[in-house]
Amino acid sequence: MEKRRLGKTGPEVSAIALGCMGMSGMYGPSDRAESVATIHAALDAGVTLLDTGDFYGMGHNELLIAEALKGAPRDAYQLSVKFGALRDPSGGWIGFDGRPEAVKTSLAYTLVRLGVDHIDVYRPARLDPNVPVEETIGAIAELVKAGYVGHIGLSEVGPETIRRAAAVHPIVDLQIEYSLISRAVEDEVLPALREFGIATTAYGVLSRGLISGHWTKPDMAKGDFRAMSPRFQDGNAERNLALVDALRKVADGKGVTVAQIAIAWALAQGADIVPVIGARRRDRLTEALGALDVKLSGDDLAAIERAMPKGSAAGERYPEHQMAMLDGGR
């Protein structure tokens, strides 16, 4: 397994990380046994970085990961955890809490659910507009000093917040959506990260399956986040799938799948980029890991750009009310 370092001060991790959110219902029903088997297969393949959030399934995802990791040596994997999103009993999203007291409480529950004594990378899932980021990061820094957290990360924030956070404590990575179809981060966010020596853990590399080469346009299952996503709506979906068809021709010319060329493109954007792959099944995981063997030439990258030009996506990546919660990289 190829390794990459999370920033100047962070740990060495697998070049591809496993995002576990989809194993807890965000894309419709999931198979618990297959989810556990997929985590086992990832570890066997050399994947070390597992990403979750304490609000994925209201704790379900952390408990699932704990089940899958039972018996595994603690130094065989790294846990990246997001916190702060508030949900009601029906699963509705009701705000964000980045207060220092909430930071420490969230971590205490996460450690119990995961059954570990520390989290490798801990990060607020969003910027709390009511709490200075210095206070949130300062609270995590106290947890680092106490040994409960190894490193501090950020998620979905812009250059100014990155600078303010980095002034409080070293930041190892920013988790943000970055893919062929979501490239706004290239304008200001990536340059700011590179200025501070901060890595990017890129989620949504396959745009929630939209550019995986597998998604067509069925009725979405109950509870599937994509039913509310603008890029999957009538009109937008068809335009985006036309882009995927163009990308498929490039992939076919390389003898690889659409998903593999999309992941390989992300890997080729710099050694400071770690794609987070949301595979829920072993076959999808195997396909994704195959991207590590795909080498893209300058001509290949130019062909990919022609097939899916920057800014060509139809629709925003979240509904407008959720876009309003983003601090950077819209």
Image (tube, rainbow, N blue to C red):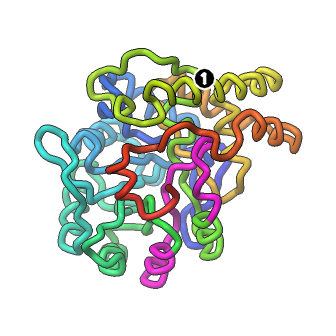
Indicate the amino acid at tag 1: Gly
Q: Which residue is drawn at 47% across and 18% down?
A: 217
Was residue 162 drawn as part of the magenta stretch in this picture? yes
Near-viewer residue (305 or 81): 305
Residue 11, horizontal then vertical, whole percent: 54, 63
Name the image quarter holding residue 132.
Answer: bottom left
Q: Residues within 10 Å of mark 1 (few under 14, many from 20)?
A: some
Q: What's the magenta region?
A: 160-187
In this rendering, the answer to whether 115 lies above or below 150 is above
Name the image quarter holding residue 292.
Answer: top right
Q: Is residue 290 visible?
A: yes
Q: Which residue is drawn at 52% across and 58% down?
A: 329
Residue 214 in the figure: left or right of residue 136: right
Check the image and name the residue furthest to the bottom.
167
Residue linked to disc 1: 213
Near-viewer residue (149 or 234): 234
Near-viewer residue (61 or 209): 209
Q: Which residue is drawn at 66% across and 36% down?
A: 262
Locate the N terminus and report the quarter of the image it occupies.
Answer: top right
Residue 275 in the figure: left or right of residue 55: right
Q: Residue at x 59, y 51 (%)?
A: 274
Residue 212, horizontal then vertical, whole percent: 58, 28
Residue 46, horizontal then vertical, whole percent: 58, 41
Q: How many marks?
A: 1
Check the image and name the residue furthest to the left.
89
Residue 189 in the figure: left or right of residue 137: right
Residue 151 in the figure: left or right of residue 325: right
